[in-house]
Image (tube, rainbow, N blue to C red):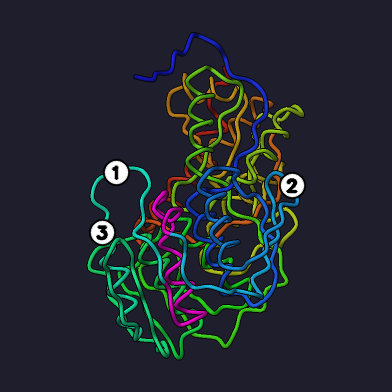
Amino acid sequence: MEKLVINGPTRLKGDVNISGAKNAAVAIIPATLLIDGECTLENVPNISDVKLSCTILEKLGAKITWLTENSLKVDTRKITSTRAPLDITSKFRASYYLIGSLLSRCGKAEVGLPGGCKLGARPIDQHIKGFEALGANTTVAQGKIIAEADRLVGTSIYMDTVSVGATINVMLAAVLAEGITTIDNAAKEPHVVDVANFLNTMGADIHGAGTDVIKVTGVKKLHGNATYSIVPDQIEAGTFMLAAIASKGDVVIQFDGDGQHSAKYIDLLVKEIENGNSIVIGSRFVDEKKPFTARMIGSRLIAGAIKLITGKTIKDPTSGFRAYDKACIRDYATEMNNPPEPDTLVYMLRKNRKIKEVQVQMSEREFGESYLDLVNTIKYMSRMMVSIFLIQPFRKVK
């Protein structure tokens, strides 16, 4: 039995590059079959499943050129076959994405039943349900799936169970279908969003990815001739962050788990900590103007209150995307009533902690729901204002 032996304790220190998300890459590569042209993919994880995906595409007639270790160019103008080699598709799970792509572009797909890691039963019935709802005939026999359609027509599809694979596969099949396809009870994972973003970059018309209802309006063709960077792997980023915390590292990242924050900015925040800042805020408003919306009223009030008390300007005090140095980690861990909220920035400024904002882009929420309804928003703002004006300025600085 193979095992890992870890000798410690050892404090982790240094820089790491977060790989592209594997679950996005193995769907995006088959999705290039929908393009009648070329595209360039960046931040591609150099792993076996990705290489198998590329090998299959080459067998189907695509031309793939690795530009660097983690970027490649895909030319799918000359697809000569709709039959994926069974000996390769049986080696990994994500080979089923070939069905949706080939069916959409060519009207036919013959793909071996997917193999890969043994993580229990993961049926493909929802994939087949979606294909047939769009107008395809499917057959499962002799270890392969055959799907055929003279034409695919958009319709409403309800997923009986939430399935990432089925959501993406039906989305792929619907991109070139006639009319509008609605996928209800859709999966909301980051790689579903990344595949939709890739397709939209290439000319697709997909809305709602990241919510439980996705609408795909079919288009005549995808134009390609664009470059797309695969989203960093959030599991890998989270693993490194937890490892740094567990080994008493120098930096902690505060990172929302609802999909609004992108791991690609973590390195930027860490570099500013290394430049001598104590708190680095991933801000939406360093280079961009804060919109005049109801949601931003609270942010403006808090920013104004902090400036009135401290004389310092913090443009995005409600951002939950932050990096903290070792001293701040100790402050938050050991001092009572000092959570990493906007109001405690006043206390940190009184302690002469250097705070810097860096521009980041944030996405719409992908998971969960905000607790800030009208009542909770009033309570939250009341608590922030009382704390900023009546508590934080008078706390004893330790």
- Rendering coords of residue 18 (x, y %): 60, 40
Magenta residues, as a range? 86-109
> What residue sits right under mark 3 in the picture?
123
Q: What's the amino acid at mark 2?
A: Thr
Q: Can you tell which mark lies on residue 68? A: 2
> Quadrant where the C terminus lies?
top right
Q: Is residue 59 left or right of residue 386?
A: right
Give the vertical position of 220 relative to 336 (above or below): below
Say whether residue 89 is magenta. Answer: yes
* SS under mark 3: loop
- What residue is drawn where x is 57% and y is 70%? 33
Q: What's the amino acid at mark 3?
A: Pro
> What residue sits right under mark 1 in the picture?
119
**Residues at marks 1 and 3, CA–CA distance in whole angstroms:** 11 Å
Query: Which of pointers 2 and 3 lies earlier in the amino acid sequence?
Result: 2
* SS under mark 1: loop
- What residue is drawn where x is 67% and y is 38%? 267
Say whether residue 194 is magenta. Answer: no
Mark 1 neighbour density, 10 Å: few (under 14) some (14–19) many (20 or more): few
- Rendering coords of residue 199 (x, y %): 57, 71
**Residues at marks 2 and 3, CA–CA distance in whole angstroms:** 36 Å
Q: Nearer the viewer, residue 386 or 379?
A: 379
